[in-house]
Image: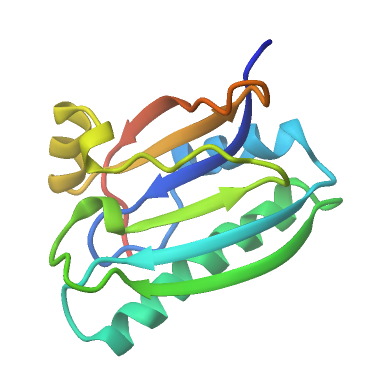
């Protein structure tokens, strides 16, 4: 069975919540699969800095993505926008600086540090934005990813 995007994970550079054009393209691709879907958007931050600041930053990331979804898929419903805050105890882990977009029924897992290539981890550590499309074929619940790496963007 063909695998279709069912969500995306957008990894952000440190202290950044703005969406660049590559992030926008990835969001468009996901929402093109289900332009009237109900989606959940959850933002996270790493554990660098104050937990209160990271809660706000994770919320800004999620809100920016949700607002862009509304622009590109006006028929979609944002079920919830969640500020997941920081991932406690992880320090400056680039995979914690992310927003997850989930379409209904998406069971694909967000890649963990061990599931990302060394080049992707190096790009994240260098401050690049990375977008990973989650795909799910509904028969095996496997996850494949397409990774796009972009330059750093402003906060």
> Residue 103: x and y, percent?
68, 45
Instruction: Tell me what residue is drawn at x 56 percent, y 68 percent.
Output: 63
Instruction: Tell me what residue is drawn at x 27 percent, y 33 percent.
Output: 115
> Residue 8: x and y, percent?
52, 41
Residue situated in front as seen by the camera: 16 or 43: 43
Residue situated in front as seen by the camera: 85 or 127: 85
Quadrant of the image containing the C terminus: bottom left
- In this rendering, the count of numbered labels is 0
Left or right of residue 9, residue 140 in this image: right
Q: Given the current orientation, which residue lies at the most extreme top position?
A: 1
The quadrant in which residue 85 appears is bottom left
Q: In the displayed structure, would residue 69 be above or below residue 58?
A: above
Instruction: Tell me what residue is drawn at x 27 percent, y 85 percent.
Output: 51
The quadrant in which residue 86 appears is bottom left
Quadrant of the image containing the N terminus: top right
Left or right of residue 141, residue 49 in this image: left
> Residue 70: x and y, percent?
73, 57
Q: Given the current orientation, which residue lies at the most extreme front position?
A: 140
> Residue 138: x and y, percent?
68, 26
Q: Specify how the rendered protein is coloured.
A: rainbow
Left or right of residue 24, residue 66 in this image: right
Residue situated in front as seen by the camera: 6 or 57: 6
Q: In the displayed structure, would residue 55 be above or below residue 155?
A: below
Instruction: Tell me what residue is drawn at x 64 percent, y 59 percent.
Output: 40
Residue situated in front as seen by the camera: 72 or 8: 8
Left or right of residue 10, residue 35 in this image: right
């Amino acid at each position: 069975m063909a695998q279709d995007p069912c969500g995306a994970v957008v990894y952000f550079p440190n202290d950044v919540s703005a969406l660049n054009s590559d992030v926008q393209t990835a969001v468009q691709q996901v929402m093109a699969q289900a332009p009237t879907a109900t989606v959940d958007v959850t933002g996270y931050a790493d554990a660098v800095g104050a937990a209160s600041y990271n809660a706000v930053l994770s919320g800004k990331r999620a809100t920016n993505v949700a607002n862009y979804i509304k622009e590109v898929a006006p028929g979609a419903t944002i079920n919830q926008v969640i500020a997941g805050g920081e991932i406690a105890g992880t320090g400056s882990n680039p995979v914690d600086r992310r927003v997850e977009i989930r379409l209904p029924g998406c069971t694909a897992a967000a890649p963990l540090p061990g599931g990302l290539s060394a080049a992707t981890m190096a790009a994240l550590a260098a401050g690049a934005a990375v977008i990973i499309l989650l795909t799910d074929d509904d028969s095996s619940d496997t996850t494949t990813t397409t990774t796009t790496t972009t330059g750093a963007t402003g906060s």
